[in-house]
């Protein structure tokens, strides 16, 4: 059977991709950031995941405001890098896992959890920058990737709790996929940052630290936080942090934090990164509020 073995949280700042692609990793402002991922690069080389379910948001690269899916799952064979600003990154094409993607879609949609099915989708820095941070600059990515795009751009966005519950539903789906696959779930975006307006440049280290503590130990407190609180504490784009809760929801009630990294600044944002593993509890790890109440009674 397929199994979720770990979760990774990571910022996806586009300037990090540009620094890497332009050979600037050793410049003083970038060196600490890439150093902060060296442990994780060694860890993931040993873990050798088969598939990453990569939760990220599109930044007007694949979707315009003409259509805005709340959740979109990439079911294609492959996904081309795209990007705004610096242009498409010269990174390998992203190879999907259509069989597992369709299985997840089937499972969660029949649990009444709607996803938009994407047979073609270009993927921007939200997805490719975390891949680069974790795997460096290979000629081909050493893993298959199922992109899962979440709308955190156009209101109304999904709640933090819905993101978490999507992670739980994904875990149920993965657990019923018959192939023996080592699957990781990644959540990207954040940490505190605001790109425009009177609070542009906002960084809130205290909130970011609290978020990382609670992500492992008390995720329920993050699930019930309204968008307004994420935005007030972490900035308008800091709301991307709700995507980390999908990763967390997929890991079950208890996790162990293997690694944490936090650094200010990258571009004008705070960079955060964690590696979490599920703690074996013996019991099935997810709540099942997708079961119709009459059936559950
Ligand atoms: C920037 C853009 C992002 O999407 C993000 O998550 C962080 C920073 C930026 O433009 O600097
Ligand atoms: Fe972003």
Image (cartoon, rainbow, N blue to C red):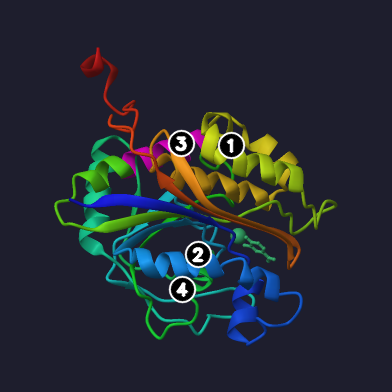
Work out whether mark 3 precedes mark 2 in sequence or the reverse, and give the earlier one. Answer: 2
Work out whether mark 1 precedes mark 2 in sequence or the reverse, and give the earlier one. Answer: 2
4 or 3: mark nearer the eye: 4
Outermost residue toward the top in this view:
297
Image mark for residue 162: 3
Q: Is mark 4 within 8 Å of ligand 1?
A: no
Secondary structure mostly seen in the magenta stretch: helix
Q: Which residue is mark 2?
A: 40
User: Which residue: 75% across, 48% down?
Assistant: 205
Q: Which residues are magenta?
A: 160-170
Image mark for residue 135: 4
4 or 2: mark nearer the eye: 2
Can you say which quadrant of the picture contains the C terminus? top left
The answer for how far apart the CA atoms under marks 3 and 2 are is 28 Å
Q: Does residue 53 appear in this view? A: yes
Work out whether mark 1 precedes mark 4 in sequence or the reverse, and give the earlier one. Answer: 4
Q: Which residue is mark 1?
A: 214
């Amino acid at each position: 059977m397929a199994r979720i073995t770990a979760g990774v949280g990571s910022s996806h700042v586009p300037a990090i991709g540009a620094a890497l692609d332009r050979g600037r990793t050793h410049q003083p402002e970038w060196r600490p950031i890439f150093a902060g991922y060296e442990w994780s690069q060694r860890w993931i080389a040993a873990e050798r995941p088969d598939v990453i379910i990569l939760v990220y948001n599109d930044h007007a690269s694949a979707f315009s405001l003409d259509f805005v899916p709340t959740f979109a799952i990439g079911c294609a064979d492959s996904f081309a890098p795209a990007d705004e600003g610096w242009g498409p990154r010269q990174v390998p094409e992203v190879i999907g896992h259509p069989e597992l993607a369709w299985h997840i879609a089937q499972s969660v949609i029949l649990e009444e959890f709607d996803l938009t099915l994407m047979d073609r989708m270009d993927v921007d820095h939200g997805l490719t920058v975390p891949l680069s941070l974790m795997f460096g600059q290979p000629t081909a990515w050493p893993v298959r990737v199922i992109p899962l795009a979440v709308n955190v751009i156009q209101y109304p966005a999904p709640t933090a709790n819905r993101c978490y519950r999507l992670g739980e539903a994904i875990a149920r789906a993965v657990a019923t996929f018959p192939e023996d696959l080592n699957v990781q779930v990644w959540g990207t975006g954040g940490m505190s940052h605001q790109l425009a307006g009177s609070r542009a440049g906002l960084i809130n280290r205290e909130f970011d630290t609290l978020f990382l503590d609670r992500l492992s130990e008390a995720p329920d407190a993050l699930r019930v936080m309204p968008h307004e609180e994420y935005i007030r504490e972490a900035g308008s784009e800091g709301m991307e942090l709700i995507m980390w809760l999908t990763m967390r929801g997929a890991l079950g009630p208890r996790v162990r934090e293997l690694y944490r990294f936090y650094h200010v600044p990258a571009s004008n944002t705070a960079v955060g990164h964690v590696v979490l593993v599920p703690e074996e509890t013996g019991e099935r790890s997810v709540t099942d509020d997708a079961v119709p109440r009459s059936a559950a009674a």
